[in-house]
Each structure stands twice: as structure tokens, then as C-alpha cells.
Image (cartoon, grey):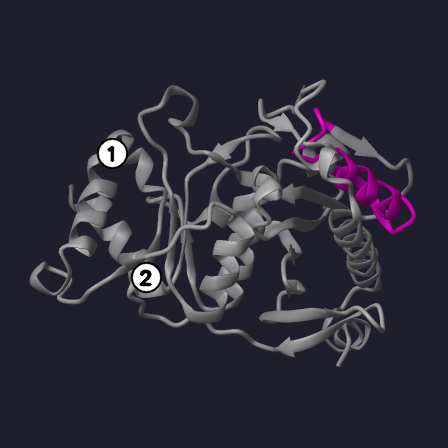
């Protein structure tokens, strides 16, 4: 089954289906751009630009953002917001749905050929002014997903009836359903965290990771392996396929005391996908999808994956 037929069967709103198709076409163009761009443009450090979140923009960040805008403004989207924009873009129409995106997640890994991707979230305006619509909490999402540009170009997506995996057939130019109704395994023996920041972790995170690393002789009574790609879409792909827990907690660094990842562009869309696949997503205390959004580029901790392990992490927080 291709993406068009999947949406025909599972999406209740034609406007959402049309927006997703536009995103898919944009992703195909982004994937082609990544594969064909000249090497000097990939790692160029000339004329560095900083996005609204304070991160250095790579040329492909900007290209990907422009591609998304060009496709979405022809779709039934009312507006667009991204990590690369200061505010939102008003497409100046009377449509009912908005799109938020991280146009090129993991772009710092471009020059080492690690999988990168595009994360998206679709929400209803809910009769709100456009600027207010973009700061609704994640529970209002109608669809979310992410494209991965790796050995294959893949798409993990939900329209609220489970999480499904598609892969791009480059001959047909279509995304083909590979796996429907993904279930993240409830238990796991793998965790993903950037251990280089151990000295900045709070006591709960340190306690939880220590328990995992103590293996069979420790309180968890099983051995864990650590995985860390450093590309959210790559780490998430692994967890959707075989389980695990991903941790990017807040830490003692001033810039990341409220977390590192963006709530609207990264945490919310990933959390919606995870919950639709019977996993859990939290900031350590609350469900990600219930977190109040105060501003467009808000940061948040993000811990997600196999249900048993995420609940164990939350239990560690509540016990200390």
C-alpha cells in the first residue's frame, strides 16, 4: 500500500492528507538535495548564520526550510513555523491546519554521513488566532511524523490511528507502507544518552543510569547496552524498530536547565508517535503531550521509548 492509499483509508480529514502528501513530496526533494549537494556546501563554515534557537545553520538547514515552505504554501496549510524561523509564516488563507517542523534534524552530522531527517507536526487552528494556534500543547496534534534520510529514505507517521513506517520507492517516487501499527517493545536492555554530559546530570538521571550500568549484579538485575547516534531521528528509528529508551534530560548547564530539545518541533511530534506505538514520553515528571507551551522555541527534556523503562525513570525521579 502506498502513502496515498493509506491516507485514503486512515485519515478522516482530506486537508490533513493533502498536507502530508505535500510534506512527503518536499521530503523527496530534500533527500535528493542532500545526496546531490556539493561537498563544499555541506561543511561550509563561511558566513555562519545563527537560527532563532542560537544554533549554527548549515546551508542544508536553510535549503530544507525553503523546500518545505515552497510545498506547504500550495497545500491546505494556514501557516508554518520551524526551528529556522524567528516566528511563524502566515500563508494568508482561511485554512484550518498549521504545520510545525524541524526541517533538518541532526544537521550537525551531515559531514560524517550519519542519518538525518525532517520532523513535522500538524495541528488544527481550533479557531484561534494564528500566533496562538502555534503554542497549543501537544495533545492537540492531528498528525506527526519524521522522515529519515539514510541508506533508505523512510517515514514514521501517525494520523491518530497507530504509528506506521513507510519507505521511499525511488523508482516510483512514492512512499510504500512497510509496517503498520508499530508496537514499541515494552521492555528493553538498551538506553541512549550522551554520557559526555554525565557531570551535569541531576541526581535522578545519574541514579537511573548507574542502576542500568550495574547490570545483573545491580538493582535492575539485567545487563544494558548503550546506544547513542546523536541524531534524534536515527535514535528514534532504532527505538521504534526494536525498543529502548532515549534520554535527553535537563542538566546543570545554564542554557539547558530547561532541556535541550524543542518542545514544539521535536518533543511533541516524537511523543505523539511514541504514544501511538504504545510507548511512553515524559520530561521526567509529566507526559510530554500535556506540557504547557509558552513560546514557540521552548525547550524541554525528552525521555521516551519502551514503557517499562520510561516509567522506571519517572519512578526514580519521584523517589529522590
Q: Is residue 207 left or right of residue 192?
A: left
Q: Residues within 10 Å of mark 1 (few under 14, many from 20)?
A: some
Quarter location, residue 10: bottom right
- Magenta region, residue range: 61-87
The image shows residue 89 at horizontal and vertical percentages of 80, 32
Residue at 24 percent across and 31 percent down: it is: 199
**Front position in the image: 199 or 274:** 199
Q: CA distance from mark 1 to mark 2?
A: 21 Å
Considering only vertical position in the picture, is 176 above or below 104?
below
Residue highlighted by disc 1: 202
SS label for mark 1? loop
Extreme-front residue of the structure: 39
Assign the C terminus to one quadrant of the image.
top left
Extreme-bottom residue of the structure: 1
**Front position in the image: 316 or 60:** 60
The image shows residue 84 at horizontal and vertical percentages of 69, 31
Q: Residues within 10 Å of mark 2 (few under 14, many from 20)?
A: many
Q: Which mark is residue 58?
A: none
Assign the N terminus to one quadrant of the image.
bottom right
The residue mark sitting in front, 1 or 2, is: 2
Q: Which mark is residue 190?
A: 2
SS label for mark 2? strand
Q: Is residue 165 magenta?
A: no
The image shows residue 151 at horizontal and vertical percentages of 63, 63
Amino acid at each position: 500500500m502506498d502513502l496515498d492509499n493509506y491516507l485514503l483509508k486512515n485519515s478522516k480529514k482530506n486537508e490533513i492528507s493533502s498536507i502530508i502528501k505535500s510534506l512527503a513530496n518536499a521530503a523527496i526533494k530534500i533527500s535528493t538535495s542532500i545526496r546531490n549537494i556539493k561537498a563544499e556546501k555541506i561543511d561550509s563554515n563561511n558566513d555562519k548564520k545563527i537560527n532563532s534557537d542560537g544554533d549554527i545553520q548549515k546551508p542544508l538547514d536553510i535549503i530544507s526550510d525553503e523546500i518545505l515552505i515552497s510545498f506547504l504554501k500550495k497545500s491546505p496549510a494556514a501557516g508554518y513555523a520551524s526551528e529556522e524561523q524567528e516566528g511563524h509564516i502566515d500563508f494568508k488563507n482561511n485554512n484550518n491546519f498549521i504545520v510545525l517542523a524541524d526541517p533538518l534534524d541532526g544537521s550537525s552530522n551531515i559531514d560524517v554521513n550519519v542519518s538525518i531527517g525532517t520532523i513535522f507536526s500538524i495541528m488544527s487552528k481550533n479557531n484561534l488566532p494564528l500566533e496562538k494556534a502555534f503554542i497549543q500543547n501537544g495533545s492537540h496534534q492531528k498528525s506527526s511524523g519524521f522522515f529519515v534520510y539514510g541508506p533508505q529514505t523512510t517515514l514514521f507517521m501517525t494520523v491518530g490511528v497507530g504509528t506506521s513506517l513507510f519507505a521511499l520507492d525511488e523508482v516510483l517516487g512514492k512512499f510504500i507502507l512497510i509496517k503498520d501499527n508499530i508496537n514499541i517493545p515494552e521492555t528493553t536492555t538498551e538506553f541512549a544518552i550522551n554520557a559526555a554530559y554525565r557531570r551535569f546530570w541531576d541526581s535522578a538521571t545519574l541514579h537511573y543510569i548507574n542502576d542500568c550500568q550495574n547490570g545483573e549484579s545491580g538493582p535492575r538485575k539485567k545487563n544494558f547496552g548503550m546506544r547513542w547516534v546523536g541524531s534524534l531521528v536515527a535514535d528514534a528509528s532504532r527505538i521504534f524498530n526494536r525498543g529502548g529508551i532515549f534520554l535527553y534530560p535537563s542538566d546543570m548547564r545554564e542554557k539547558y536547565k530547561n532541556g535541550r530539545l524543542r518542545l514544539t518541533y521535536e518533543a511533541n511530534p516524537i511523543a505523539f508517535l511514541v504514544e501511538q506505538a504504545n510507548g511512553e514520553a515524559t520530561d521526567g515528571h509529566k507526559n510530554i503531550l500535556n506540557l504547557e507551551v509558552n513560546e514557540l522555541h521552548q525547550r524541554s527534556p525528552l525521555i521516551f521509548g519502551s514503557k517499562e523503562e520510561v516509567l522506571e525513570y519517572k519512578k526514580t525521579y519521584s523517589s529522590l
